[in-house]
Image (cartoon, rainbow, N blue to C red):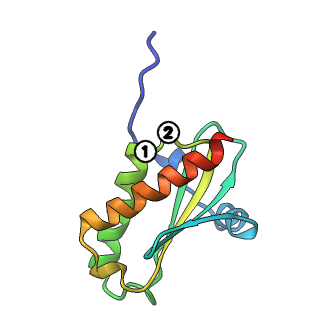
Amino acid sequence: MTNTVTYEFNRESRLLTPGQFQSVFSKPLRFGSSHITILVTPNSDNNNRLGLAIAKKRVKLAVQRNRIKRQIRESFRLNQHNIPHIDIVVMVKSGTDKLENKEINQQLEKIWRKIIQRHKK
């Protein structure tokens, strides 16, 4: 049986309970760009987990919040195999809804690279 890389984003890839989110918020490493902040904590599981905290206060329109979430999930899905085993919570700052999808992706790519660099040590 070959060890194939799957690019899926399933239930195991998500932070689901308030407790899981709380463990990330309690003592995170912070990575960020001008519009996106990513909080990271190591986890004991054998996979990465992503949580999204996109506040209504920061991005008013549901359609924009959903678009941003889709971009983040897709970027995570494609990069998850390079990232060490961590729990991740992504938050956005005001004005993120004004960015094009391409700009959101560029900011995320930059942050994934920072996280990978940091955890190689």
At label 1, counting other C-alpha atoms closer than 10 Å, the crowd grade (few under 14, some 14-19, many 20 or more) is some
Q: Where is residue 52 in the image (x, y as percent from the top left)?
A: 49, 66
**Amino acid at the residue labelled 2:** Asn
Q: Say which quadrant the N terminus sits in.
A: top left
Find numbered disc 1 in the image and state the secondary structure of the residue it sits on: helix
Q: Nearer the viewer, residue 30 or 67?
A: 30
User: Can you say which quadrant of the picture contains the C terminus?
Assistant: top right
Q: Position of residue 100 (x, y in %)?
A: 24, 71
Where in the figure is residue 94, as x and y percent of width and height? 42, 86
Vertical order, 1 against 53 (above or below): above
In the image, residue 43 lies at what x, y percent?
70, 47
**Dot 2: what SS?**
loop
Identify which residue is drawn at 29% across, 77% down: 64
Residue positioned 69% across, 69% down in the render: 25
- Residue beneath disc 1: 79
Q: Which residue is drawn at 35% across and 76% down?
A: 65
Circles 1, 2 touching at the beta carbon (< 8 Å): yes
Relative side of 40 to 1, left or right: right
Mark identifier at residue 65: none
In the image, what residue type sits under mark 1?
A: Asn
Q: Is residue 33 left or right of residue 20?
A: left
Image quadrant in which you'd find residue 119: top right
Residue located beneath label 2 in the image: 82
Q: Is residue 112 left or right of residue 70?
A: right
Q: In this view, does 51 lie above or below 12?
A: below
